[in-house]
Structures are given as structure tokens and as C-alpha cells.
Image: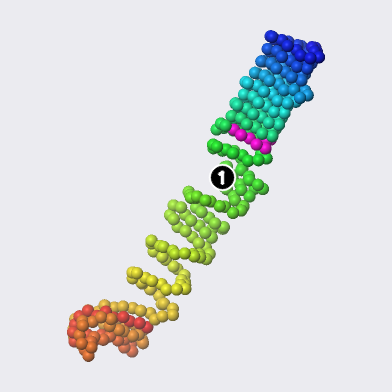
């Protein structure tokens, strides 16, 4: 064992097989097979072959390189310009190192790494900042910041964050993504996404598959554009249709209906007479039956004739048997006849 009440200063190596105890240590390098205890330790290189590295009190540890087969514990800050390699537990108030490789647990108030973090044990810190992080077990940190494109938590690792998680690149999850109490959930295998509350989308939404709302009451097929509405469709504004409007059931209009082109009605129109039109080309003067029949009581009116005087104007009517008759006023020509009933 080596024990010094104040400072151990060595220009070269310090090799101790037993315990080293000093207020401070300042050496080029240290090789220890036992436990090292000091308030302050400053080494260019530290190697702990068998024992632990402990700095107690309010002391800090500053290394160019740290490697310990046992545990490393510092009451305040561990600062290293290069790598930190610890086979056992690492416990410090804060870490400020180039890179860290840990096979045991890491406990620190804050962890700042300019390079990568690789740990097979747990890591717990108030804040972690690193280029990349790879963990095979759990990571407990309210804040994690990464400057690189990759942050991996592998195997059965659990990540718990007490604050925001900001990711600049792609995020891939091998398991389920649960937000809150599962109100937002994504299955990475099936791709099923469940939203338990309102979904607000400020931009364009594109769906490659069918859109089903409820139990399929509202359904849109993205390939054909076919839209199915199982209930009432209420439109507050104008509706423009570039194609055919097909209605298999009743249609109710609370105001005027304007038709620019032809209107074809195959059934009856409730609330107003049925209307039919005929264009008759008369080839002989006088009165004769056209061969077209309509319901008894139908009224026929000539809408346009050959322009003869009123006294001899053409006429049309439906007789008691439903036959349509015309009288061309002894001037054969084309007659437009409107029949209503």
C-alpha cells in the first residue's frame, strides 16, 4: 500500500500493488492492482488492473485516457480528452469525455460526450449529450441530445425521457410506439396506427390504401376515387360535379333546380304534371292520328307551327282513347308538341 498525507507527484509511472491513498495524485501514468483513493487525481494515463478508482470529497478527476477493470467513482466531474473505458460501474457527478465504453452501469448528473457512447449496462443521468449512443439495457435521462444521425437503444433496452425528444433524422422502432396511455399507437409489423383522440393535419394527407371511417360508413378508394357515404351527407357550400350524378333513392331540393342541358325523367315527377314532347312532321293536310298514345285526359299544345294565321293555326289534342291527334291547318310541316298529364 502507498499512503501520503498530501500530494503524490511523479514524472513517470506510478505502480502500486496495494491500496493508494493520498490527498492528490499528479503523475504521468498509473498502474494499480489495488484500490486508488484520492481527493484529486490527474493522470495522462490510468490503468486499474484489478481494483477500483475512487476520488472522494469535492475532488475532480482529469485524464487523457481512463481504463478500469473495476469500478470508477468520482464525487464531482470526470474530464477526459480521449476515451473512457470502465469494466465495472462508473459513478460521477458529471462526465465530460471524448468517448465512453462501459460494460457496467453509468450514473451521473450530466453526461457530455464529443464522441460515441457504448454501454452494455444501465445509464442514468439528468442530461446526456453525445455523437451517438448505443445501449443494450436501459437509459434513464430527462434530456438526450445527439449531434449525429444515429442513436441506438438495442436488444431489450428501455429508454425513459422526462422531457422532449428531438430527432433530426430518421427514427426506426422495432417494437410498438405508444404515446401517452396508448391513445396514439403504431404497430411496426402491420403498420396499423391508432389515434384515440382528434387528428389535426395542417398540410396535405395522402393515403395509398382505402380510407375507412367508423365501421366503413365513409369509405374512399384511392385507386378508383369511389367514395361511399353510409349516412347523411351535408354540404354547406357549393358542390361541383364534373361527371354524372346518379341517385338511386329519393332526392329532395329545398330551392330551385337549374338544368343547362337536357333533363330526362324516366318516372313521374311528384308535385307537378308529367311532361313529354313530340316532334311531328306532317306529310298530308288535314286532321289525323299520330299513332302515339298518352293517358286519357292529357293535354297537347303545339309550341311551334309553320307560321300560318291564327284561324287556321295547327292544333293537337288527346282523344278519349288516349290517341294523340294533330291538325296542321292544311299546311304540312314540322310541329313541336308538348303533352302534359
Instruction: Look at 33% across and 78% down and name the residue there.
Output: 276
The percent coordinates of residue 54 (x first, y second) are 76, 21
Q: For this rendering, which residue is in front, 2 or 61?
A: 61
Q: Is 1 covered by the magenta stretch?
A: no
Magenta stretch mostly in which secondary structure? strand
Name the residue located 27 percent from the left edge and 79 percent from the top edge: 336
Question: Is residue 141 inside the magenta stretch?
Answer: yes
- The stretch in magenta equals 140-146
Q: Which residue is mark 1?
A: 190
Which part of the image, by quadrant, shows the C terminus?
bottom left
Please determine whether, in this image, residue 131 is positioned above or below residue 190: above
Say whether residue 58 is left or right of residue 116: right
Q: Nearer the viewer, residue 197 or 137?
A: 197
Image vertical order of residue 45 relative to residue 243, above or below: above
Identify the residue at horizontal 41%, vertical 65% (top origin): 245
Q: Say which quarter of the image contains residue 315.
A: bottom left
Identify the residue at the far front of this view: 6
In the rendered image, which quarter is residue 338 located in?
Answer: bottom left
Q: Residues within 10 Å of mark 1 (few under 14, many from 20)?
A: few
Q: Is residue 8 left or right of residue 144?
A: right
Question: How far from the left and from the top, in percent, is residue 327?
Answer: 24, 86
As helix, strand or loop, the secondary structure at mark 1 comes to loop
Amino acid at each position: 500500500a502507498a499512503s501520503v498525507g498530501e500530494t503524490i507527484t511523479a514524472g513517470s509511472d506510478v505502480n502500486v500493488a496495494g491500496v493508494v491513498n493520498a490527498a492528490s495524485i499528479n503523475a504521468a501514468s498509473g498502474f494499480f492492482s489495488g484500490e486508488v483513493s484520492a481527493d484529486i487525481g490527474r493522470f495522462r494515463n490510468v490503468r486499474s488492473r484489478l481494483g477500483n478508482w475512487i476520488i472522494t470529497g469535492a475532488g475532480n478527476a482529469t485524464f487523457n485516457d481512463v481504463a478500469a477493470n473495476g469500478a470508477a467513482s468520482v464525487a464531482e466531474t470526470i474530464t477526459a480528452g480521449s476515451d473512457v473505458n470502465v469494466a465495472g460501474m462508473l459513478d460521477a457527478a458529471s462526465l465530460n469525455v471524448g468517448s465512453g465504453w462501459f460494460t457496467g452501469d453509468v450514473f451521473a448528473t450530466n453526461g457530455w460526450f464529443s464522441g460515441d457512447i457504448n454501454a452494455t449496462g444501465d445509464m442514468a443521468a439528468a442530461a446526456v449529450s453525445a455523437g451517438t449512443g448505443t445501449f443494450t439495457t436501459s437509459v434513464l435521462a430527462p434530456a438526450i441530445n445527439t449531434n449525429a444521425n444515429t442513436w441506438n437503444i438495442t436488444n431489450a433496452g428501455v429508454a425513459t425521457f422526462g422531457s422532449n425528444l428531438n430527432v433530426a433524422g430518421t427514427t426506426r422502432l422495432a417494437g410498438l410506439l405508444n404515446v401517452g396511455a396508448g391513445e396514439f399507437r403504431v404497430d411496426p409489423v402491420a403498420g396499423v396506427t391508432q389515434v384515440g383522440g382528434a387528428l389535426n393535419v395542417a398540410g396535405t394527407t395522402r393515403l395509398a390504401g382505402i380510407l375507412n371511417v367508423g365501421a366503413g360508413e365513409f369509405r374512399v378508394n384511392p385507386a378508383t376515387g369511389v367514395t361511399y357515404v353510409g349516412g347523411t351527407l351535408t354540404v354547406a357550400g357549393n358542390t361541383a360535379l364534373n361527371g354524372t350524378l346518379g341517385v338511386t333513392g329519393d332526392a329532395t331540393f329545398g330551392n330551385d333546380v337549374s338544368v343547362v342541358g337536357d333533363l330526362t325523367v324516366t318516372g313521374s315527377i311528384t308535385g307537378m304534371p308529367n311532361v313529354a314532347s313530340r316532334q311531328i312532321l306532317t306529310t298530308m293536310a288535314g286532321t289525323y292520328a299520330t299513332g302515339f298514345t298518352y293517358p286519357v285526359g292529357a293535354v297537347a299544345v303545339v309550341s311551334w307551327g309553320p307560321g300560318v294565321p291564327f284561324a287556321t293555326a295547327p292544333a293537337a289534342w288527346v282523344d278519349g282513347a288516349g290517341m294523340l291527334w294533330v291538325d296542321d291547318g292544311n299546311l304540312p310541316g314540322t310541329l313541336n308538341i308538348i303533352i302534359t298529364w
